[in-house]
Amino acid sequence: MNRRNWREDVWKEPKKRQRRRQRRIVLQFLCVGMLMFCAGLYVGTVYAQTTGEQESMAAGKQRNTPQVTEGKSGQVGSAAPARIAAELDEYTEENENRDTQENGETQRKDEQEENLPKDWNLLLVNADHPLPDNFSVELGSIGGGHKLDVRAVKDYKEMIQAAKRERVTIYVTSSYRSMDKQMELHQNKIKDYMMDGYSYQEAQEKAATVVAMPGTSEHQLGLAVDLVSSEYRSLDEKQENTRGFRWLKEHCSEYGFILRYPNGSTDITGIIYEPWHFRYVGREAAREITEQGVTLEEYLGARPVFGEDPEEREAEEYEKITGKENDVQEEKEKETATKNKD
């Protein structure tokens, strides 16, 4: 090798090492970028699936603003926190124990008269049929921190995957709830109505049609899920206009689920129309319920929660409203009379 060639080789060698180092740096940047993108995608998916209960209930509050906002005391829309606290304190532990005992007696009486099935997947839970005293359930994960009765998990996952194959993305916002969680949600709803001017008793009655009383919620069974479509995630009646709801309404029975609280069934189920609440009953029962177009109460032969005659219930509600208005008018007349005497 002559002197000139040796110098050229010595000059080329650092350039080769420099190019190799540059390629390594570029590859490293690409790898890090891909990892960050995947991590961001995963976090975004988990966040969407685990939308908090408080956000769901806030949406429920917005859609369920009561038409009547004047309580018996004549206060409108701005109930004092002190009054709310005082009335809540009146609901003592003694009353809770009495209610639990009465619910247990009602449940045993209903079971004898209605001869309801004991199958785990057909267990009826509503305002007239609370959870059995010694109820327990083995839970299985369905992702995103949510759980269901382990016997319903397989069908649930197959249903969600089937929807994905048709490019329909469905998220779960609520699944199994403990007794403590159900109590928290129910009390929060009662407070919301009391802040709108309702007395404790009135607020409790209205709250029970939106958030089931502790011990009477299907979520405590581990067989109910609140499902929303990817394009609209609020728990209100607009959910029925989504691709997710339309797909579920058509196909959920194929996987053992039913729309638990259909439109126009409040007098039977005791719960308002909820196009997001689905209940697992098993594939055979789901198919029969869907074909017959009935509620779970009707399918099992249970009595309607609000009685046989919806018109009679409407008349009772009207009497409550008019009676409340009359009470307020009487108080105003008394105040006017007192001022005139003075």
Image: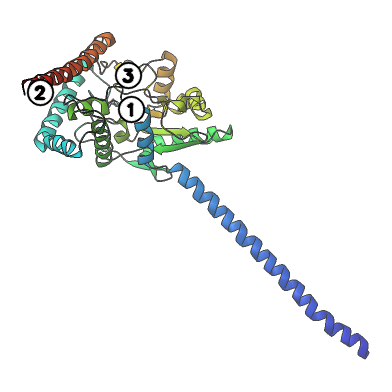
Residue 169 seen in this snapshot: yes
Mark 3 vs 2: CB contact within 8 A: no
Q: Nearer the viewer, mark 3 or mark 1?
A: 1
Q: Where is residue 138 drawn, in percent x and y?
A: 32, 41
Label tally: 3
Dot 2 or dot 1: first in sequence order is: 1
Q: Where is residue 76 drawn, in percent x and y?
A: 24, 28
297 shown above or below 99: above
Q: How much space separates mark 2 and mark 1, taking CA atoms?
A: 35 Å
* Mark 1, residue position: 65
Neighbours of disc 1 within 10 Å: few (<14), some (14-19), many (20+): few
The one nearer the camera, 232 or 300, is 232
Neighbours of disc 2 within 10 Å: few (<14), some (14-19), many (20+): few
Q: Where is residue 87 drawn, in percent x and y?
A: 14, 34
* Mark 2, residue position: 339
Residue at 30% in and 34% down: 221
Q: Secondary structure at mark 1?
A: loop
* Mark 3, residue position: 266
Quadrant where the C terminus is found in the figure: top left
Q: How much space separates mark 3 and mark 1, taking CA atoms?
A: 17 Å
Residue 208 seen in this snapshot: no
The quarter of the displayed image where residue 280 is located: top left
The single residue placed furthest to the bottom in the displayed view is 3
Dot 3 or dot 2: first in sequence order is: 3
Q: Secondary structure at mark 3?
A: helix
Q: How is the image coloured?
A: rainbow
Residue 115 vs residue 237: left or right? left
Disc 2 marks a residue whose amino acid type is: Lys
Q: Where is residue 237 drawn, in percent x and y?
A: 42, 25
23 shown above or below 203: below
